[in-house]
Amino acid sequence: MSRIGLAIVGALALVAATVTTVPTLRAQLRSAPPPQAKILSGSDIGFRVEGVDPRTGGPTGTWMLRVNGEWVEIGSMPTVKRLK
């Protein structure tokens, strides 16, 4: 078989494998979002639960802070530390 023919067969095999695998992976990765985002909180700090980690089963989400009665996301600033 010529090199071009072998390259075409290899490319077709790769495309076929991708076409059959992608829908399966999408179905496995698709997770239903919770019906309503809940904030587990203290008085001024909370955690908004947005989903479940498929590996551990633990909650995933965003840290929130109550400012003037409204919940806002907490952002973090990158810092530089000197290594000793």
Image: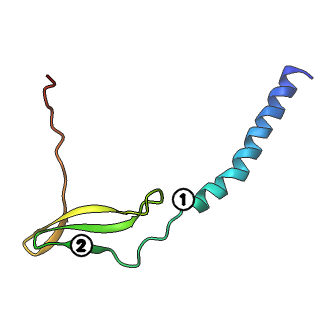
Secondary element at image label 1: helix
Q: Are marks 2 and 1 in contact (CB under 8 Å)?
A: no
Query: Residue 48's spot in the image, x, y percent?
Result: 27, 68
- Across and down, in percent, residue 74 comes to 18, 58
Checking the image for residue 40, the label placed there is: 2
Q: In the current view of this chain or complex, which residue is farthest to the left?
A: 68
Give the residue at x 80% y 27%: 7
- Compared with 80, 21 (above or below) is below
Quadrant of the snapshot with the C terminus: top left
The crowding category of the residue bearing disc 2, from other C-alpha atoms within 10 Å (few below 14, some 14 to 19, many at least 20), is few
Residue 80, position in %: x, y? 15, 32
Q: Amino acid at mark 2?
A: Leu
Counting labels gives 2
- Residue occupying image coordinates x 16% and y 25%: 83
Question: In this view of the protein, which residue sits in the foreground, 45 or 3?
Answer: 45
Q: Residue at x 47, y 60 (%)?
A: 54
Q: What residue is disc 1 on? A: 29
Of circles 2 and 1, which is in front?
Answer: 2
Q: Residue furthest front?
A: 56
Comparing 11 with 61, the one in front is 61
Under mark 1, the amino acid is Leu
For this rendering, which residue is in front, 25 or 8?
25
